[in-house]
Amino acid sequence: MTRRVSVTGLLALVLRRLSRRPLRTGLTLGGIALAMFLYTMVDAMRAGVREATEAGPDDRTLVVYRENRWCPFTSRLPQWYLDRIEGIDGVVSATPMAIRVSNCRASLDVVTFRGVPVESFLANPPTGFTLLAGETTAFRGRGDAALVGEPLAARRGLRVGDRFEAAGISVVVAGIFASDEPQDRNAAYVPLAFLQESATRGSTGGEVTQFNVVVDSSDRLEAVAAEIDRLFEHEVHPTSTRPERAFVARAARDIVALVGFASLLGWAALGAVFGLVANAMVLAMQDRVRDHAVMRTLGFTGGVLTLLAAAEGLLLGLVGGALGASAAWMVLTVGRFSLTVEGANLELASDPAIALTGIGIAIAVGVVAGLVPGLQSARGEIVANLRTT
Amino acid sequence: MNGTTSTGEDNATPLIECRDLTREFRRGEQVIRPLDGLDLELAAGSFVALMGPSGSGKSTLLNLIAGIDRPTRGTLRIGGRDLGRLSGRDLADWRSRQIGYIFQLYNLVPVLTAYENVELPLLLHGLSRGERHRRVSEALARVGLVDRHRHFPRQLSGGQEQRVAIARAIVTDPAILLADEPTGDLDHDSAAAVMDLLTSLHRELGKTLVVVTHDPAVAERAQRTLHLEKGRLVAAAEITR
């Protein structure tokens, strides 16, 4: 025997069951949305850490820092190192960089100034550098001009021509740029000499915080780093050279560890979603033991009833997940959060894929949470279940 | 009396045929046998009342005929089909087409309106929305509740709820209507109205009607009254109308 069920009619039945228990449905959706908000935020942090610290096959940038120094305030290297670094076999370019930060500790709103030689910076800009507003002529034309990363500009509400001050340094926005690198996106590039002169902690001209060195092949990163450190090991200011992402991972190691811990919260949030949906579904099924027995008397099979329960879980997961993940995505997009520690930036990624993944997980959890009590409810003896009060 | 009992029209082929029908339950070491080797034939279009004390097997027999329970031993053939040989899925499909079941406590789904409760069994029949609407409206009209179709069960009286349940039972046009103490929870007037309705369904639509009842007034309306005790038939009375 075969039968054709009315799919639209059954879907309407699922919607009626949910919409006519508004308090229970609302509380369940609220719980799922909150949990998915938390999960998505934590996942955005994890994605930001991954992007900033995990090496890729195309990474060719080294950071030369002062040995045994951890903060831009204390890493001081002579600018004359530049000539010797550029002379090493395999080095394509080297950029001396003075860095000043408004806060050396971990913070969500740190302004990082990177002082660079203007012409060499414009000749060898960071990966994916695109000027979104302003002109490079303005950057060349005045000493206190700054090219500001787009997330930083958005966070601070900066536009071309605005003057802003941080860490005791006052600059004028000459341009706003986009970049593929999170370290660049959250920084303000200023002329090196200007930053050296503006330094308030005893720096003098001729000192920089670090050198960013681009090598000709990612295979040679370690060899060139070793060569740089060997070159300066007997100088007054010995260096410690690492691939850029390893450098960020070391600088932000405390934050990375915290984010790792926070990811446990993300999984806990996922567990909370499962618990919430499962609890709501179990309670709903307990309430419906007799209803389901009546429906089976009318000819509904256990399979159809189980599918109805799974569809309820799916809808709860879909709507709750979409609410929570979308809210998180909007907060991340509007807030443009960046965790900065010791001048290293970890962005909270606002990738829609993270929100979609969250929704997908909520749906899967909802379906599973609906299936189990649905199966239990559909399997009991009809006559016994009809006697249930 | 435990021989084969035929009811209804004498020459008709029996619609419902029980042979050595037995149902047992186990509770620990104890075996409870609410139905014990019953032989019975019911003709199509008959109206039969099942009476007897509590625990005599009336409801068990009704549940077996409805296909919501399975016999421990014996055979139950309805319309020539041996229910014991049907898979769970086929039995559910058979129920949806052949049986209209009316419960003592109505058993309407509380979050659905009267209309939606009556529409519920039609969702399994692959009908268009328009066809479902036509059938539900027709069923509600027959029970006199067209003006209550948007009401939820909590907004209806007991008698109205039972009439919605009857509309739900007849909306698929089943051959057999089974009612388990359909007036047991109703006042005198409502009970009489419900029995008038069931009797008219039997007479006008030719439905086979089997009613479990303790109420002699209900049994008086039936063509045949069967008395059960301890799972066996002890008496049968036929009333010619």
Image (cartoon, coloured by chain):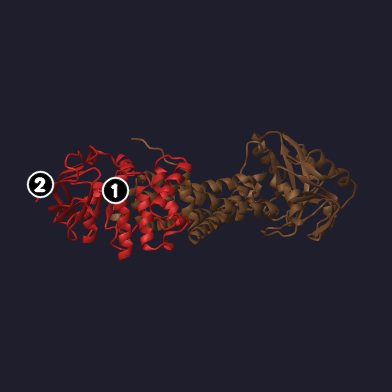
Chain colours: A brown, B red
**Residue at (46% x, 49% y) in the render:** A13
The residue mark sitting in front, 2 or 1, is 1
Answer whether residue B31 is visible to the viewer in this image.
no
Question: What residue is drawn where x is 88% and y is 45%?
Answer: A140
Of marks 2 and 1, which one's residue comes earlier in the chain? 2
Q: Residue furthest right?
A: A141
Classify A329 as above or below B153.
Answer: above
Q: Point out residue B201 in the picture as x, y percentages from the top left corner.
A: 32, 49
Can residue A246 be seen in the rendering of this structure?
yes
Q: In the figure, is residue A5 to the left or right of A172?
A: left
Q: Nearer the viewer, residue A327 or B9?
A: B9
Please state which amino acid type lies under the numbered disc 1. Arg
Which amino acid lies under the numbered mark 2 shown in the image of this protein? Gly
Q: Nearer the viewer, residue A295 or A192?
A: A295
Which label sits on residue B3? 2
Near-viewer residue (A370 or B180): B180
- Is residue A72 positioned above or below B7 on the image? below
The span from disc 2 to disc 1 (Cα, nearest Å) is 29 Å
Residue A47 as seen in the image, left or right of residue A84: left
Dot label at residue A243: none
Q: Nearer the viewer, residue A188 or A241?
A: A188
Q: Are marks 2 and 1 in contact (CB under 8 Å)?
A: no
Residue count near mark 1 (Cα–Cα under 10 Å), binned few <14, some 14–19, many ≥20: some
The residue at which mark 1 appears reads as B203
Residue count near mark 2 (Cα–Cα under 10 Å), binned few <14, some 14–19, many ≥20: some
**Residue A230, x across and y down, in percent:** 69, 42
Image position of A340 (left or right of B64)? right
Q: At numbered mark 2, what does the secondary structure look like: helix, strand or loop? A: loop
* Subunit of label 2: B
SS under mark 1 = helix
Which chain is mark 1 on? Answer: B
Q: Residue furthest front?
A: B241
